[in-house]
Amino acid sequence: MWGRRTGTLLRVSGLWPTGVLRRRPLNCNAASLAGSNSLRCWNCGGLEGPLRGDRFFCPQCRALQPPDPTQDYFSLMDCNRSFRVDTAKLQHRYQQLQRLVHPDFFSQKSQTEKDFSEKHSTLVNDAYKTLLAPLSRGLYLLKLRGVEIPEGTDYEMDSQFLMEIMEINEKLAEAQSETAMKEIESIVRAKQKELTDSVSRAFEGGLAEPAVETW
């Protein structure tokens, strides 16, 4: 319920990040983007080549290694597996990782490293977008806990919430000034915080089902 409610509120105000709302929850297993899961570097054969924490490069030959198929988005982005995320820290981590693996920095490298760079960069982008937005972050958390809400699932809105949406739509239609728009934005953000806090409490309780019900 919460995802539909918050998504509706944010669509009304135009606050929802582009391309995230209708996105299918991303697979928590990065295997489709990953290369070998060997314990040896693909380039020099040295041990401990694949990723260990932030080790994207072989410690011996410095060749870029394939993504780790067992690493989830929270681990990759150095975040606690929680609904509450420090978005400033998340953005810093995103920029840090892209400075390491962005394809622009591998134009003179081997084709293998170019390919790995593309995969790493795509994975980092997906992880960042998923964890940045409350809706996709919550869906991803549920998926990690073995609960998946099918794409396109329609949840009925209660009449009180539907009335709130209608009132916001009416205010948007009647707004004639920037001040009026800011007031509506404040209302939407306050409601978003209320719903976000409700879902956070459900997740922090350690149970997935209450989070789904709140959704």
Image (tube, rainbow, N blue to C red):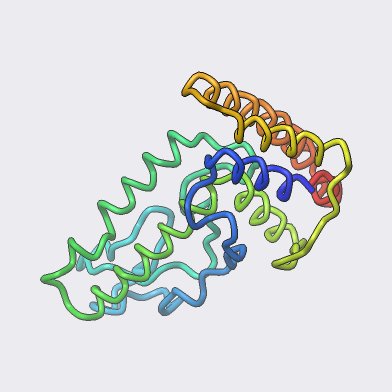
Q: x, y (%) of residue 76?
A: 47, 54
The residue closer to the viewer here, 160 or 61, is 160
Up-down relation of residue 130 to residue 5 (above or below): below
Q: x, y (%) of residue 126?
A: 47, 60
Up-down relation of residue 47 to residue 197 (above or below): below
Q: x, y (%) of residue 103?
A: 24, 65
Left-right relation of 188 to 19: right
Residue 154, picture quadrant: bottom right
Up-down relation of residue 65 to residue 142 (above or below): below
The residue closer to the viewer here, 178 or 40, is 178
Image point 45% across, 74% down: which residue? 33
Left-right relation of 27 to 33: right
Q: x, y (%) of residue 202?
A: 80, 40
Image point 58% across, 21% down: which residue? 183
Image point 46% across, 51% down: which residue? 128
Extreme residue toward the right, this view: 159
